[in-house]
Amino acid sequence: MSFPTDLEIAQSAQIKHIREIADKIGIDREDLEYYGKYKAKIPLKYINEEKIKQSKLILVSAINPTPAGEGKTTVSVGLCDGLNKVGKKAVAVLREPSLGPVFGIKGGAAGGGYAQVIPMVDINLHFTGDFSAVEKANNLLSALIDNKLQDKKRTLNIDPRTIVWKRVMDMNDRSLRHIVIGLGGSTNGITREEGFNITPASEVMAILCLSKDFEDLKNRLGNIFVGYTFDKKPIYARDLNAQGAMAILLKDAIRPNLVQTLEGNPAILHGGPFANIAQGTNTIIATKMGLSLADYVVTEAGFGADLGAEKFMHIKGHYGNLKPDAYVIVATIRALRYHGGAKKGEYESPNLQAVKKGIENLKKHIENAFKFGLSPVIAINHFATDSQEEIDFVKTECEKLGVKAVLADEFVHGGEGMKDLANAVLQSIDEAKNNFRRLYDLNDSVENKIETIAKEVYGADAAVFSQKAKNQLKSIYDLGLDELPICMAKTQKSLSDDEKKIGRPTGFKVTVREFEFAAGAGFIIPILGDMMRMPGLPSIPAAEGMDIDKDGNIVGLS
């Protein structure tokens, strides 16, 4: 009998009413805002700063992934279940999936096997409408900008050529990267160049994720940079009186979403920025909510640790005053084969020689953890094609570096298969091995902060800047944004800015092609290599394998 699909497992689960999940973590049923039987929003009043100081935060990241991903969400969910199995009060705090990857490559992003958050279909689709709210708030500002341009009496003297604000939608659509709007005559607006980003890469999403409360949300929305006037004065969203209306659209989205794991443990999902083109972590509010309601919180940082984890340390950690009490790096044997030179179609076949070469990628991420003052636990996310000698080799090599590697078997066995990892993480916390520190000071120059990340995290020889990037740097300094943290936009497939440089590349430079900046969210975005903030669909999108029958049953979403 074949192993059931993620969707089949999720659909057969004995799902509990969300009020029962709320009971486990001390939320009054009357305080929940219900979205059906199985999901609800939590009011912000449950954030307790004193309780937060007592709870432990476990950060989960990964090595550089194969295109299929290495299962960070699956491991995070499984670890939460494992911690509960060994008697700890733990909550998983995760990001919400984006429709772009769901219908593109992934086909779903709610975990996998017997380590999932449910209701899986709802979570992967429209969920509680947070992404839609972000999209609408973003595009409201776009509409207000173009309305100002159209109104000759109230234009604010905005130079349309300088407008950097883009529209967004939550779908991979490369044709929208660069467009022209306002065609068709004077009543249709001012003709200008425009473009779309995907919703998870939007500044509004970043603001939602980094805001502490409603007032902070409004202030950040008001600080969004729009462009310049004809006499070179900066224009912000507050100059258009946009922040109040934008905040109204986010009044429900700011509250975290409560769901459950397959094993009936609480999970909080909130926010969904990508880690390759945004900051890649869930909201500060959700993380603090989890720390207020449980003793242990498992949270993830997107893609490889060179992206999501680095941004957690320097961006989310900074604004949320958060630091990891334990750090888990997810590795898979198949990804180590990939980084060792195994070709497409060979990732699923035992190949010890490839693993021996590919382990250099893992070793670099371990070394990076040490630089942050963290002693990681390595989770070997188990696949059926892993050979014992490959697993033993990875464990031995990790042991040589003074870190423990543990087989994570959550996909098949759920929380039961994660008890060893849970105990290893608890041991790491108990031994107080982690003394977190950041790699750069915010007062450093923009160039030095970028170079620090490039050299220390990626292993580059240097960071170089295109002429366009150099010109844009002047604007960043002129606007007084140079003391903000850095949010690199870079391929997730390599430690470098070239996706073909797998393993642990050396002797390379990274190139900053151009800059964007998020004055409201509070970070600078160097765009490396050929990264785009609006992805395209693959040649065979996951959407082509999805369907719904006459009774409303969905297939192909997994």
Image (cartoon, helix red, strand yellow):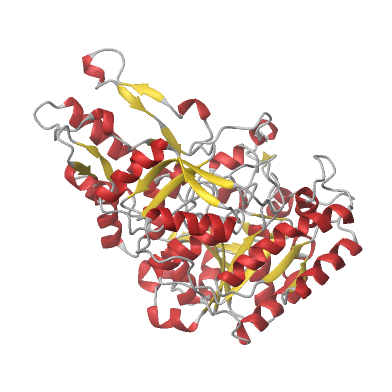
Q: Position of residue 338 (x, y in %)?
A: 77, 48
Q: Residue furthest top?
A: 185
- Residue at the spot x=71%, y=57% of the render? 361
Please say if 408 is above or below 340: below
Q: Nearer the viewer, residue 464 or 382?
A: 464
Instruction: Using the rendered image of the protein, determine whether residue 61 is visible from the camera's viewpoint.
Output: yes
Q: Position of residue 486 (x, y in %)?
A: 43, 55
Query: Left or right: where does residue 108 sit relative to residue 225?
Result: right
- Residue at the spot x=67%, y=34% of the render? 549
Q: Nearer the viewer, residue 462 or 412?
A: 462
Q: Position of residue 394 (x, y in %)?
A: 81, 65
- Residue at the spot x=67%, y=69% of the render? 79
Q: Nearer the viewer, residue 232 or 146?
A: 232
Query: Left or right: where does residue 302 sit relative to residue 197?
Result: right
Please say if 37 is above or below 428: above
**In the rendered picture of this protein, how many numbered marks are placed on residues?**
0
Q: Position of residue 435 (x, y in %)?
A: 54, 79
- Residue at the spot x=48%, y=75% of the render? 291
Q: Residue furthest bottom?
A: 431
